[in-house]
Image (cartoon, coloured by chain):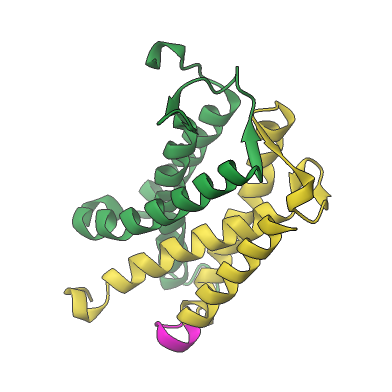
Amino acid sequence: MREYSVISIVLLVILVITDLRFGSGLLRRRGVWYAMALLLLMTVLFDQPVIAAGLVKYDDAFNSGIRFVYMPVEDLVFGANLYLASMMSWDYLGSKEWGGK
Amino acid sequence: MLEDLTLNTYLWGLLLSLLLSQAVAERLGVKIYRQGKRLLLSMIPVSILFLLWDVVAIVRGHWFFGNDMLPVRILGLLPVEEVLFFIIIPYCSINTYECFREIRRRGMLA
């Protein structure tokens, strides 16, 4: 089963819904999209040498098998999860309930 | 154990990411580390959650590592680079987020 694809997409959907419905709606702010675009570009650039060097390897039985050069496309979804979760967590702790702005 | 650590491509990439992100932040006067408690409290759950995902993926075989290349393992499973990744990259994410907020605040981007 394409477990890597499924896990990464399901978690991203959960994060997006959490942000838009229950959170502060980070994804409605343009700055977040700029940050996300830059971080994903960096992901593509930094993933290549690490995978090309054989430091990290992927079993294509668990992903879509679609690769952007060396990088499985699922890595972008993984990255989006990590970046968005970090920003949401930071934003949440900066909110009024936590003594922030 | 740590004497087996080599400055491999993975570590270089992490250090470079941190340096790049921090260099831009410094230029913009963005200092997220000044809010140490908020930073730590927001990073810890994210790091733990994604390290758990990492462990599940490694155990299931979604991805694996060139054994001789990343020899320093935590609990005999996680390469130390992987643990650093889940500390450095959340930091870079928050840093990048705050940098773009500052850039937009200054009207340098729509």
User: Which of the two residues, B97 or B79, is positioned nearer the viewer here?
Assistant: B79
In the image, is residue A35 above or below residue A62?
below
- The foreground one among B99 and B1 is B1
Give the magenta-colored segment's residue range. A20-25
Give the quadrant of the N terminus of chain B. top left
Residue found at x 82% / y 51%? A65
Placement of B18 over or under B39, stated as above or below: above
Which chain is depicted yellow?
A: A
The answer to which of A71 and B75 lies nearer the viewer is: B75
**Quarter location, residue B3:** top left
Residue at figure coordinates x 40%, y 62% from the top left: B98
Task: Say how many tags the image has.
Answer: 0
Residue B1 position (above or below residue A53)? above
Q: Residue at x 26, y 53 (%)?
A: B40
Determine the residue positioned at 34% across, 65% down: A90
Asked if residue A78 is positioned above or below residue B22 in the image, the reply reads: below
Rendered location of residue B77, percent (x, y)? 48, 32
Shade representing chain B: green
Q: Position of residue B27 (x, y in %)?
A: 39, 48
